[in-house]
Amino acid sequence: MRKPDKTLTRHELAIMKIVWRLGTATVRDVYEALRERRRIAYTTVMTVMNILESKGYLKKERAKDARAFRYRPAHPEQAVLTTMISDFVNRVFDGAAQPLLLHLVKGRRLSIKEREELLRLIKEAE
Protein backbone atom coordinates (compact mmCIF):
# COMPACT_ATOMS: atom_id res chain seq x y z
CA MET A 1 0.00 0.00 0.00
CA ARG A 2 1.34 3.41 -0.90
CA LYS A 3 2.00 6.18 1.59
CA PRO A 4 -1.06 8.42 1.98
CA ASP A 5 -0.98 11.84 0.35
CA LYS A 6 -0.40 14.47 3.01
CA THR A 7 -3.27 16.73 2.11
CA LEU A 8 -6.86 15.69 1.69
CA THR A 9 -9.23 17.56 -0.58
CA ARG A 10 -12.18 19.36 0.98
CA HIS A 11 -14.54 16.52 0.02
CA GLU A 12 -12.14 13.82 1.21
CA LEU A 13 -11.72 15.56 4.56
CA ALA A 14 -15.50 15.91 4.99
CA ILE A 15 -15.89 12.16 4.45
CA MET A 16 -12.98 11.31 6.75
CA LYS A 17 -14.50 13.43 9.53
CA ILE A 18 -17.69 11.39 9.30
CA VAL A 19 -15.85 8.05 9.32
CA TRP A 20 -13.67 9.16 12.25
CA ARG A 21 -16.81 10.21 14.15
CA LEU A 22 -18.65 6.96 13.40
CA GLY A 23 -15.66 4.63 13.77
CA THR A 24 -16.81 2.45 10.87
CA ALA A 25 -19.25 3.34 8.13
CA THR A 26 -20.76 2.15 4.89
CA VAL A 27 -21.04 4.38 1.84
CA ARG A 28 -24.74 4.72 2.71
CA ASP A 29 -23.89 5.92 6.25
CA VAL A 30 -21.58 8.62 4.92
CA TYR A 31 -24.00 9.57 2.15
CA GLU A 32 -26.84 10.06 4.64
CA ALA A 33 -24.61 12.14 6.95
CA LEU A 34 -23.49 14.38 4.09
CA ARG A 35 -27.04 14.80 2.76
CA GLU A 36 -28.06 16.41 6.04
CA ARG A 37 -25.88 19.39 5.05
CA ARG A 38 -25.87 19.44 1.23
CA ARG A 39 -26.91 17.68 -1.94
CA ILE A 40 -24.51 15.01 -3.12
CA ALA A 41 -24.78 11.93 -5.29
CA TYR A 42 -24.39 8.49 -3.74
CA THR A 43 -21.98 7.54 -6.52
CA THR A 44 -19.81 10.56 -5.71
CA VAL A 45 -19.51 9.44 -2.09
CA MET A 46 -18.67 5.91 -3.24
CA THR A 47 -16.01 7.19 -5.65
CA VAL A 48 -14.36 9.44 -3.06
CA MET A 49 -14.36 6.66 -0.46
CA ASN A 50 -12.67 4.34 -2.98
CA ILE A 51 -10.08 7.06 -3.65
CA LEU A 52 -9.50 7.41 0.10
CA GLU A 53 -8.98 3.67 0.31
CA SER A 54 -6.49 3.71 -2.57
CA LYS A 55 -4.63 6.60 -0.91
CA GLY A 56 -4.38 4.60 2.31
CA TYR A 57 -6.74 6.67 4.46
CA LEU A 58 -9.55 4.10 4.66
CA LYS A 59 -9.60 0.33 5.00
CA LYS A 60 -12.59 -1.61 3.77
CA GLU A 61 -13.92 -4.98 4.70
CA ARG A 62 -17.07 -6.82 3.80
CA ALA A 63 -19.24 -7.19 6.84
CA LYS A 64 -20.36 -10.71 7.62
CA ASP A 65 -23.79 -11.48 6.16
CA ALA A 66 -23.92 -8.02 4.56
CA ARG A 67 -23.71 -6.84 0.98
CA ALA A 68 -22.04 -3.53 1.70
CA PHE A 69 -18.44 -2.86 2.59
CA ARG A 70 -17.66 -1.22 5.91
CA TYR A 71 -14.91 1.37 5.95
CA ARG A 72 -12.76 2.32 8.89
CA PRO A 73 -9.98 4.89 9.24
CA ALA A 74 -6.51 3.58 8.51
CA HIS A 75 -4.96 6.35 10.64
CA PRO A 76 -6.13 8.25 13.73
CA GLU A 77 -7.70 11.65 13.09
CA GLN A 78 -5.08 13.54 15.09
CA ALA A 79 -2.20 11.94 13.16
CA VAL A 80 -3.71 12.92 9.80
CA LEU A 81 -4.53 16.46 10.92
CA THR A 82 -1.03 16.93 12.34
CA THR A 83 0.47 15.85 9.02
CA MET A 84 -1.86 18.15 7.07
CA ILE A 85 -1.06 21.13 9.30
CA SER A 86 2.68 20.49 9.08
CA ASP A 87 2.42 20.25 5.30
CA PHE A 88 0.46 23.52 5.19
CA VAL A 89 2.98 25.34 7.39
CA ASN A 90 5.84 24.00 5.26
CA ARG A 91 4.22 24.99 1.97
CA VAL A 92 2.78 28.37 2.93
CA PHE A 93 5.11 29.61 5.66
CA ASP A 94 8.35 27.81 4.71
CA GLY A 95 8.12 25.68 7.85
CA ALA A 96 7.84 28.59 10.30
CA ALA A 97 4.84 28.53 12.64
CA GLN A 98 5.25 32.12 13.87
CA PRO A 99 3.86 33.76 10.69
CA LEU A 100 0.80 31.51 10.93
CA LEU A 101 0.20 32.48 14.55
CA LEU A 102 0.69 36.17 13.74
CA HIS A 103 -1.76 35.87 10.88
CA LEU A 104 -4.36 34.28 13.15
CA VAL A 105 -3.86 36.82 15.95
CA LYS A 106 -3.71 39.92 13.73
CA GLY A 107 -6.53 38.71 11.54
CA ARG A 108 -8.81 38.70 14.58
CA ARG A 109 -9.55 35.03 14.01
CA LEU A 110 -8.84 34.22 17.65
CA SER A 111 -11.20 35.22 20.41
CA ILE A 112 -9.84 36.74 23.61
CA LYS A 113 -10.35 33.40 25.33
CA GLU A 114 -8.45 31.60 22.54
CA ARG A 115 -5.60 34.13 22.79
CA GLU A 116 -5.38 33.60 26.54
CA GLU A 117 -5.28 29.83 26.00
CA LEU A 118 -2.55 30.24 23.38
CA LEU A 119 -0.49 32.36 25.80
CA ARG A 120 -0.98 29.76 28.50
CA LEU A 121 0.20 26.98 26.16
CA ILE A 122 3.25 28.98 25.12
CA LYS A 123 4.21 29.60 28.74
CA GLU A 124 3.61 25.95 29.56
CA ALA A 125 5.88 24.88 26.69
CA GLU A 126 8.78 27.04 27.93
Image (cartoon, grey):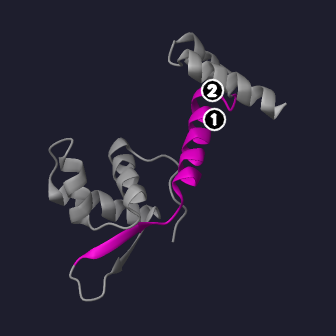
Q: Quadrant of residue 28?
A: bottom left
At horizontal 40% and vertical 51% (from top left) the residue drawn is: 17
* In the image, farthest residue toward the right: 126
Identify the secondary structure beneath mark 2.
Answer: helix
Residue position marked by numbered label 2 in the rendering: 93
Q: Which residues are magenta?
A: 68-96
What amino acid type should be assigned to the residue bearing mark 2?
Phe
Residue position marked by numbered label 1 in the rendering: 90
At horizontal 37% and vertical 67% (from top left) the residue drawn is: 24
For the image, the number of numbered tags is: 2
**Above or below 33: residue 121:** above
Q: Is residue 74 magenta?
A: yes
Mark 1 vs 2: CB contact within 8 A: yes
**Above or below 49: residue 84:** above
* Image location of residue 36, percent across then percent down: 19, 46
What amino acid type should be assigned to the residue bearing mark 1?
Asn
Q: Is residue 97 magenta?
A: no
Q: Gap between marks 1 and 2, in whole Å?
A: 6 Å
